[in-house]
Amino acid sequence: MPDHDVIVVGAGNAALAAAVSAREQGAARVVALEKASEELRGGNTHYSGGLLRFAYANPRDLAPLVPDAERQIPNFFRDVEPYPAESFREDLMRVTEGRTDPELSEILIGRSFDTVSWMAKQGITMEPALSLSGVRVGDRIKWSPGAVIRARHEGVGLSRSWFEIARDRGVEIRYGTGVTRLLQDRRGRVTGVGVHDAEGFSELNARAVVLGCGGFEANPEWRARYLGRPWDHAKVRGTRYNTGDGLRMAIEIGALPHGQWTGCHSTPIDAGAPPHGDRKLTDKTNRLSYPYGVLVNAPGRRFFDEGEDFQFYTYAKLGGIILNQPGGVAYQIFDSKVTALLEGRYKTGKPFVADTLDALVDKLPIDRSACRRTLGEYHAAISAGTFDPAARDGLATKGLTPDKSNWAQPLDAPPFVAYPVTGGITFTFGGVRVNDRAQVIATSWAPIPGLYACGEMVGGLFHTNYPGGTGLMSGAVFGRLAGAHAAGE
Ligand SMILES: Cc1cc2nc3c(=O)[nH]c(=O)nc-3n(C[C@H](O)[C@H](O)[C@H](O)COP(=O)(O)OP(=O)(O)OC[C@H]3O[C@@H](n4cnc5c(N)ncnc54)[C@H](O)[C@@H]3O)c2cc1C
């Protein structure tokens, strides 16, 4: 008789969803093995904004998730737009340039609402994600469709809730316990794991193992290997523990790699952000209001269409584009017409400030004459139109490379501010292939018996870019599936 029914590796959103789901489906002895100490537990989930993207046909469907919404935010249900499965599919297809895995994305989209409802039933409390997703226009709030709800107290609250729920359901959690390898019997069934903890090396066995131990974003050698230069230098937005261990262990026993191994999620963050995520600042180093400003690099040039789309559809690729600029930095310039639109988290930064645009440029450590030329060309290229922060307003430049496609207002209202940014890595897109039961598929294209994967370890969903709020949703969907099927082994 094995020591455990199900071993879950990791203790983020995906792993703890799996552990709770395994208990719910009848596994009596479930243990989650967390490489981090109790103090540093919870993976990227702790650092996240807690935003959840899911499909819903009618805004009223959100009522059971956020029963107090209308009291907190008058007319909440009137202002939120429906986000049917087709819209989620369109968004995912568009931002991944049609490359999202069709089978996996259907599972993600099709199970998203049911899974978020399941999370709420387990005890995850939620709230409207006003500061991330809402833009105030007159007396209405324009919500970014599909990404309206987040866990209360964001990732910190989500992670804390999962630990409490897991504990209440009788899941054992072992901290400071890194899994180093997978054990197999002679027929190839996964029968347990090798672990390294304060006592040294040992083995634990189980009927099934669920890997939910993240990507390789915190491993500079793997970043250099798969993402190339200059990713070995990237700042890590979240946990320092996601070093690709689960991917290595799975691939060592024949798992099939899947998805974009040269791709990752990375965002514009404060250039002064620490090398790894800060437990208190969490995601507050993000700088995502660039659609309303102008972005220049150290040679003083624009290099990205700041107004290509709303931030949630471009931010996850922009980090890498900034990191690849000379020096890996850029400057987001705004005037006072839009400073009220900047996300609250800009308050954690120290911008350059000046009363004229010229004086602002003088303060920036960049090629100033090139920057003045760039801004002059930008102003000359703005076409007529009306600025609307809540719609793709078509207020564009004409004839620039690249043009700014929306929200192209002149910088003409003092004071002027510039925020220095770099690209921070969030998580990697390459993973292992799983099926509709979250079983890990081998290079023989058959499932590896007894092995499941979820969360960042699932390859194939994201390519080049990503629609905001999908990582946690994918982790919960595949974690819940993995736990339920592992319980049946
Ligand atoms: C700053 C930031 C903001 C974000 N905001 C959002 C958001 O608002 N919405 C959204 O959807 N996504 C967001 N994301 C992405 C999201 O956090 C991740 O996609 C998600 O948390 C991944 O969940 P996971 O369970 O797969 O991995 P993680 O939460 O990273 O958990 C991995 C776990 O595995 C453990 N581990 C690693 N190696 C081992 C080992 N060898 N043995 C044992 N344990 C191991 C780690 O310690 C950790 O506990 C954000 C990420 C960051 C960093």
Image (cartoon, rainbow, N blue to C red):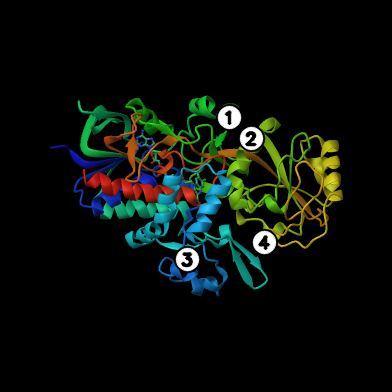
Query: Which of the two discs, 1 and 3, sits closer to the camera?
Result: 3
Q: Establish if 252 lies above or below 269.
A: above
- Mark 2 falls on what kind of element? helix
Q: Amino acid at mark 2?
A: Leu
Tell me, for residue 57, which label it has, or none: 3
**Residue 323's disc number:** 2
Q: Position of residue 452 (x, y in %)?
A: 31, 40
Q: Based on the displayed image, in which of its 4 quarters is residue 62 positioned? A: bottom left
* 80, 90: nearer the viewer: 90
Q: Please report whichever mark, 3 or 4, sits nearer to the chain's N-terminal start.
A: 3
Q: Can you tell which of label 4 and label 1 is closer to the viewer?
A: 4
Q: Position of residue 259 (x, y in %)?
A: 47, 36
Considering the image in quadrants, where does the C terminus appear?
top left
Q: Residue at x 64, y 73 (%)?
A: 139
Residue holding disc 4 = 391
What amino acid does circle 3 point to? Ala
User: CA–CA distance between discs 3 and 4?
Assistant: 21 Å
Quarter of the figure that contains the N terminus: top left
Label placed on residue 233: 1
